[in-house]
Image: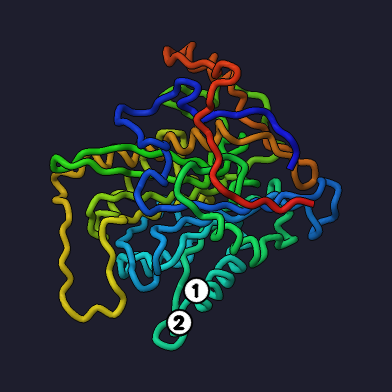
Amino acid sequence: MPEQETRCRARALGISIGTLPTGPLNAITDVPDVAVGHCSVWWGGPDLPVGQGPARTGVTAIMAHDGDLFRDRPRAGVFALNGAGEVIGSTAIREWGLLETPIVLTNSQGIGAAYDATVRWLMARDPRLGLDDVVMPVVGECDDSFLNDARGLHVLPEHVQAARDAAAPGPVDEGAVGAGVGMTCHDFKGGIGTSSRLAVAGGAGFVVGVLVLSNYGGRARLTIDGVPVGREITDLLPLDSSEGSCVVVAATDAPLSSRQCARLARRCALGLGQTGSYAADGSGEIVLAFTTADRVPRGAVRPLPRATLPDEIIAELFEAAVDATAEAVVNSLCMAVTVEGRNGNVAHALPLDRLCEIMTGYGRPARLPVAGQSSGADRAGGATERE
């Protein structure tokens, strides 16, 4: 992985989306018990023959809690804004309303390897798996083949294991990291982004955190806090543009039912719309949402006590989901570095100096951080495979 330019998050530039406050980290890990880990697979130059590299890909793992997810299952919901992508395990979430495995994100051709590696990891932890019951891991994908040699099938079981092992609470790496190494967004370099909001429902405070794997959108539609940034930056375009995809993961500590988690997931899709998505025909834009407030034990045979918020008082949670999703996308763009990959293809980083000029010109004052000032982009643990 080459040395790259210094990057910073949107709020370090003075760009704040919405009016609700963020959590301390402005990340999905502001939700208690949630952990994120990455493994970046980044090696080889553009001259390698097809099937042998370069690798510009990786794995990101999201853990809803640090216990046994298969035995103690958070309530969850799913929504597909457009289904031209895949999140394995989403059918079971729709049916049961429960999340029973880590959420693993990777590239389109690596989804099978990630699924198999996760099954083997879960069975190694639980000797009754495959006997008492089977497990269907949740594994999502986006297509990174513009930069990554997808025919090389570079995601291996050890990369999935490394991402899980790196999963931790605290700050989350963003941009060209983990599953986001090879992704593009609105014809700039995209990847991993995260954000959070604090919301009130029924007089109590809750957190809504979002993580995105951004890999969608055309340049002209890129919109940041209402400003048509993409129309103002007409250069730095890739040689090829595809409709791409996006996977969004939302977490909250609010006591929601599975149905309400699905409602929260639908609001995240509005956040994608705020940044310029129109759910293009070939763009798989899929959202998973879960709550850490409640766990359903496997094998329960008696009615379970459950307290959920009434629908009438959760509007601010919806607002939080919209704004956190939009800011997570912007963070993925602001933190991503320029990447050269397969066949010499280049995805350029969003130029932060020009972004600030454009935002300021539209009445949204923004500026580059003073040298030495914290970017608000402290790094969490992760792993990187290099040559």
| Viewer can see residue 24 | yes
* Labels 2 and 1 touching (C-beta < 8 A): yes
Q: How many marks are shown on the rendered structure?
A: 2
Q: Is residue 132 left or right of residue 235?
A: left
Pinpoint residue 308: horizontal percent, then vertical percent.
Answer: 17, 56
- At label 1, which amino acid type do we have? Leu
Say which residue appears at 57% left-offset and 53% top-offset.
142
Which is more toward the observer, 352 or 68? 68
| Viewer can see residue 109 | no
Q: Is residue 122 left or right of residue 257?
A: right
Pinpoint residue 309: horizontal percent, then vertical percent.
Answer: 16, 51
Pinpoint residue 349: horizontal percent, then vertical percent.
Answer: 64, 31
Q: Secondary structure at mark 1?
A: helix
Pinpoint residue 287: horizontal percent, then vertical percent.
Answer: 41, 52
Label 2 neighbour load within 10 Å: few <14, some 14-19, many 20+: some
Kindly identify which residue carries mark 2: 129
